[in-house]
Image: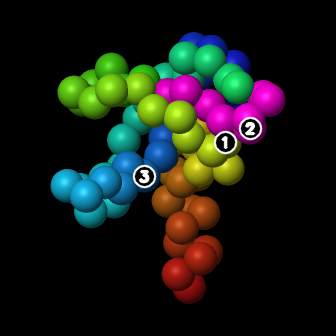
Amino acid sequence: MKPGDKVWLIIEDWCTVGEIVQGEVVYVDSRNNLVCVKFPTIRMNPRMVRPNLLFPTREALCEHYKKIFE
């Protein structure tokens, strides 16, 4: 994963119930194993996210969670 990559993730906040969104990697903090992701399509500040929660496509994200809930 590198800056500029498009990624998909599920945003869970106190005000949302697991919304699937696309973001863009801003930078990778390998020291703390976090990725900063910005969201150009929605009004949300960039966030630091663990890389294992990021997926290269929406389909990959959905397939991952489908396997968990089967």
Estimate how packed mark 3 is, as few (under 14), some (14 to 19) or many (20 or more) residues with alpha carbons within 10 Å. Answer: some
Which amino acid type is marked by label 2?
A: Asn
Residue at image coords 57%, 62%: 63
Disc number for residue 10: 3
Residue 4 in which image quadrant: top right
Marks 2 and 1 close (CB-CB < 8 Å) = yes
Task: Pick the quarter of the image with the C terminus.
Answer: bottom right
Q: Secondary structure at mark 3?
A: strand
Residue at image coords 60%, 63%: 64
Q: Is residue 44 left or right of residue 49?
A: left
Q: Earlier in the sequence, mark 2 or mark 1?
A: 2
Magenta-tinted stretch: 30-37
Q: Is residue 1 above or below residue 61?
A: above
Mark in the foreground, 3 or 2: 2
CA gap, disc 2 and disc 1 = 7 Å
CA gap, disc 3 and disc 2 = 18 Å
Q: Secondary structure at mark 1?
A: helix
CA gap, disc 1 and disc 3 = 12 Å
Residue 67: % across, % down: 61, 74
Residue 15: % across, % down: 20, 55
Q: Is residue 24 above or below residue 8?
A: above
Task: Pick the quarter of the image with the N terminus.
Answer: top right
Q: Is residue 15 left or right of residue 63?
A: left
Per the image, the residue denoted by label 2 is 33
Per the image, the residue denoted by label 1 is 51
Q: Secondary structure at mark 2?
A: loop
Residue 6 visible at all = no
